[in-house]
Amino acid sequence: MLRKLKELQLANGSFPWFRGMFPSYSTTAYVLETLGRLTALTGEKESPLSELIRKNAYNYLQSEMTQAYKRITRKNEYALNEQALNYLYICTLIPEEIPASAQKAHQFYLNALRPS
């Protein structure tokens, strides 16, 4: 099953809805969330292939959310949305450090949770 999943993963770490389609943030987030939940539920160590898939997808997710952050800050207006909430949830499931390039964006989304 993991081999088939890896075959669907694009070079940038994302997953399309179907083979041959464009990258999909939501599909990638779903795969990443599912991998995180499986690891948490089973308590088993991740296989090397699962870890590779997860790391590549996680890097894609961080990159996409950083790009979204840059677009948002250029417009200077923001309302917390489902994508940001899902991103923060996935970050709690995945045992990865937030990359330095994504720290500012990650903190922005965390701060958006706080009442103003």
Image: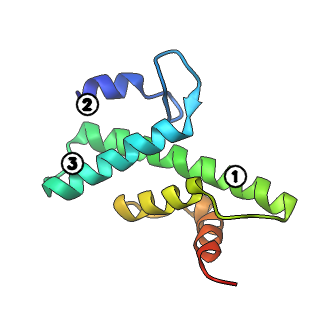
Q: Is residue 58 left or right of residue 35?
A: right
Mark 3 vs 1, N-terminal side: 3
Mark linked to residue 83: none
Q: Position of residue 72 (x, y in %)?
A: 77, 58
Label 1 belongs to which residue?
68
The three-letter amino acid code for the residue at tag 1 is Ala
Mark 2 vs 1, N-terminal side: 2
The three-letter amino acid code for the residue at tag 3 is Glu
Nearer to the camera, 25 or 53:
25
Q: How is the image coloured?
A: rainbow
Tell me what residue is drawn at x 47 percent, y 39 percent.
28
Are dots 2 and 1 in contact, CB under 8 Å?
A: no
Nearer to the camera, 41 or 98:
41
Q: Secondary structure at mark 3?
A: loop
Q: Quadrant of the N terminus?
A: top left
Are dots 3 and 1 in contact, CB under 8 Å?
A: no
Q: Position of residue 95 (x, y in %)?
A: 34, 61
Mark linked to residue 2: 2
Q: Position of residue 82 (x, y in %)?
A: 57, 55
- Outermost residue, bottom direction? 116
Q: Residue 24 appears in which quarter of the rendering?
A: top right
Q: Is residue 102 left or right of residue 39?
A: right
Mark linked to residue 46: 3
Q: Residues within 10 Å of mark 2 (few under 14, many from 20)?
A: few
